[in-house]
Image: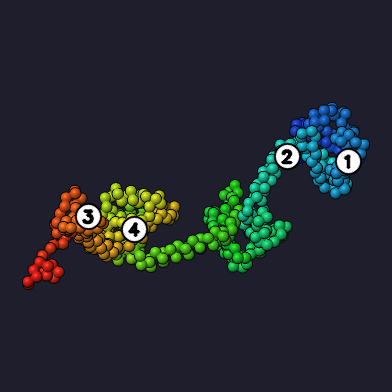
Amino acid sequence: MDQENTPDTPSDEKEKFSLLETVFNAMNDTIWLIDPDFRIRLSNKAAENFFNLPSHEINGRHCYEIVHGTSEPVSGCPVLRSLKTRKREKTEFQMGSCWFEAVVDPVFDSNGEIFSFSHAITDITSRKKAEEALKARENDLRAILEASLESVFLMDRDGRLIYANQVTAQRLQVKMDTLTAGTMYDFLTETVAENRRQHVLHVLETGLPDQFVDERAGRTILNSIYPVFDGNGRVTHLAVYGVDITERKKLEDQIRENEEKYRNLFRNNHAVLLVIDPESGLIVDANPAASRFYGYPVDVLKTMNIPELNTLDQHQIFEEMARAKAEKRNYFLFKHKLASGETRDVEVYSGPIVDQGRSLLLSIIHDISARRKIEEEKERLIHELSEALSKIKTLKGLIPICASCKKIRDDQGFWQQIESYIRDHSEAEFSHGICPDCRDKLYPNL
């Protein structure tokens, strides 16, 4: 007869039992075989080591006596629960600093009745510590995310929320416990939801982060989507960070409006305006009025250096610009050269401005050539008049004169004829004649 079809002999059965017993005792987990009345029928070597009892002191006793030291099953006993549910039951318990998991499986006879339970105790201390560490990290992460003033949430590929902080619920105007009731798109308007779907699809297809802006409930939200990959490189989740940029956008719009006002004021101003880099002397910007005055196109002016216009020595020019930059001086008189070669007298008002972090000078330039000519002519006339006046000699004060001969005493004490004294102290000249009284007295016969 074929050996494969030969029934097992008692020696074979004994060998199999011996093999099973070896495996049973080699297992690291504590294993008992328990009757429905909670008595231990069989225990392995790990159980003996775990409870520090030989098998003959374990077998035949109630399990709750050994585990809990009680006279009856404790509340939550997995054997008691399995007896009722006829299913596997589990429980975790702590002994000292170690954690263990007890797993109970019912064993049925041929009639479907429970005739024993397999009771296994596994040391889960490492797993428990890892779970506690993970939970601690999750709590730390949750605390960090909840501390954020912006919305943060994690969703799956279909948009179902796995986690969201309080700010997310506030912005969506829903309660926290309703966030997981549907998908993210359910809380958005149709237009906003469709826009978000397109960006999510892009991240899922490319595996690359993406950014986009939502306009909702009067607020502007800048959203950043980051893909989360599994071990195979497939995007399984999406982390979304939303920043409310409403105020920033308003400020940017205001800055743009102010910049446009400045540009219009700069371009349309009839005064000659130049923006100069005080470090290099380069003309950063010029308005059309400057182009008309200097005779260069604006684009050409913006390639020029201020020493090309100013007749001063370059060293002097930079010294004056340094004073203007430091606000130690803001008014200057220069001579500027035009494209035609003509030189004009100009007065310059300069003050520091900041443009995109750069310290520059805004110079307002007035052509004062005509005024300077008038001033020069005025100064010439005043000079000539002063010279003329200086030549005019006048007599003033008390003049000592003889009551008899009418001679005058000068400053040195000498007596002079009145004609000589007046001639020396004025521009007057004398022409001699005779008055009627003297004529009658001296020449009575005439």
Element carrying mark 1: loop
Between disc 4 and disc 1, whose residue precedes?
1
Residue at 11 percent across and 65 percent down: it is 431
Q: Which mark is residue 74?
A: 1
Q: What is the x, y in percent for residue 421?
A: 16, 56
Element carrying mark 3: loop
Front residue of 407 and 301 = 407
Looking at the figure, which quarter contains the C terminus?
Answer: bottom left
Q: CA distance from mark 4 to mark 1?
A: 98 Å
Looking at the figure, which quarter contains the N terminus?
Answer: top right
Q: Could you say which quadrant of the image residue 271 lies in?
A: bottom left
Q: Amino acid at mark 4?
A: Val
Q: Nearer the viewer, mark 4 or mark 1?
A: 4
Element carrying mark 4: strand
The residue sitting at the left extreme is: 445
Q: Amino acid at mark 1?
A: Val
Q: Is residue 4 above or below residue 225?
A: above
Between disc 3 and disc 2, whose residue precedes?
2
Q: Which mark is residue 400?
A: 3
Q: Nearer the viewer, mark 3 or mark 1?
A: 3
Between disc 2 and disc 1, whose residue precedes?
1
